[in-house]
Amino acid sequence: MNRSRTLATAVTLLVLGAGTLTACGSDSTDEPRSMSTTSVIDDGPTSGIRSEAASPAAESTQDSAPTPEVTDRQTEMASPAGEAVGKQNASKSAEPSESCADSNATKAVNDNIGKVPPPFPDGHQKTDWVAMDLSTYDSCSTLSWVTLSIKSATASSPYTQMLFHNGDYLGTTTSQAIGFYPTTDRLDDSSIQVTYTYVEGNESNADASGRAVSTYTWNESTESIDHAGEWPPGIG
């Protein structure tokens, strides 16, 4: 009797154990699902927000950049004295290069002086032109000039001026020589102003008080000289 009761108890325990195993192996839809960084949350916003809670970011294997070494020279230039030297050197480098004014002035005059009208148009006096100052010639300038006179010139001796564009001879400021030295000032790279002196009425040459002011400007469009202002009487 006791043996039969023991077998029945064992069978009951086996049945209960089998039921327990079946419950543990079933799939439950209430369990949370693991998401990677590339999975889209179900029923999420239309923008498709991606999960940031799944896998951690990979550790960076890139070496950190080395700290630059500061040299003694860099320390020196960072000081007030070094900064002043740097500014001074920058100022020097910003200065324009020297003009090439005198590099070939003599050749430019000598090659073209034969094209200049003679000092005395009537031909009664045979004399040659002489360049007074070559420093006003500049082959780098849009417009430059050289004033000519004669040897042993006096106040009222004939004068004329040769004009040059980037070193190329253009002609003279007037069609014939003038008396008295023409005072010339540069207005800009392409323009000069000439003040002519002449006698008025019965004035002597020493007392000449007449003045005529002209400007000469290089015209890039016409590739010629534009004149504005006045010439002395009888000159043009």
Image: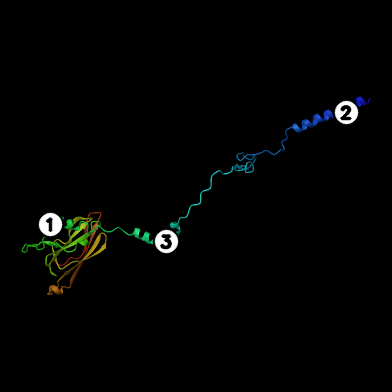
Count of marks placed on residues: 3
Residue 56 x %, y %: 62, 43
C-alpha distance separating marks 3 and 2: 102 Å
Q: Amino acid at mark 3?
A: Gly
Label drawn at residue 82: 3
- Alpha-carbon span between mark 1 and mark 3: 58 Å
In the displayed orientation, state which residue is furthest to the front: 72
Name the residue at 44% across, 60% down: 76
Q: Does the CB distance between marks 1 and 2 fall below 8 Å?
A: no
Numbered disc 1: secondary structure? helix
Nearer to us of marks 3 and 2 is 3
Q: Quadrant of residue 209?
A: bottom left
Q: Which residue is mark 2?
A: 9
Tell me residue 157's x, y (percent). 12, 67
The answer to whether 224 appears left or right of 62 in the picture is left
Q: Residue 125: name its quadrant.
A: bottom left
- Tell me the quarter of the image containing the C terminus: bottom left
In front of the other: label 1 or label 2? 2
Image quarter (top left, top right, bottom left or bottom right) of the N terminus:
top right
- Depth check: 86 or 150 in front? 86
Q: Residues within 10 Å of mark 3 (few under 14, many from 20)?
A: some
Q: Residue at x 37, y 62 (%)?
A: 88
Query: In the rendered image, which residue does mark 1 sit on?
Result: 114
Q: Amino acid at mark 1?
A: Gly
Front: mark 1 or 3: 3
Q: How far is the residue under mark 1 from the one under mark 2?
A: 144 Å
Q: Amino acid at mark 2?
A: Thr
The residue lying at 42 percent from left, 63 percent from top is 81
Q: Which mark is residue 193?
A: none
Which residue extends farthest right? 1
> Within 10 angstroms of label 2, few (less than 14), some, or many (20 or more) residues?
few
Vertical position of residue 153 compared to residue 22: above or below:
below
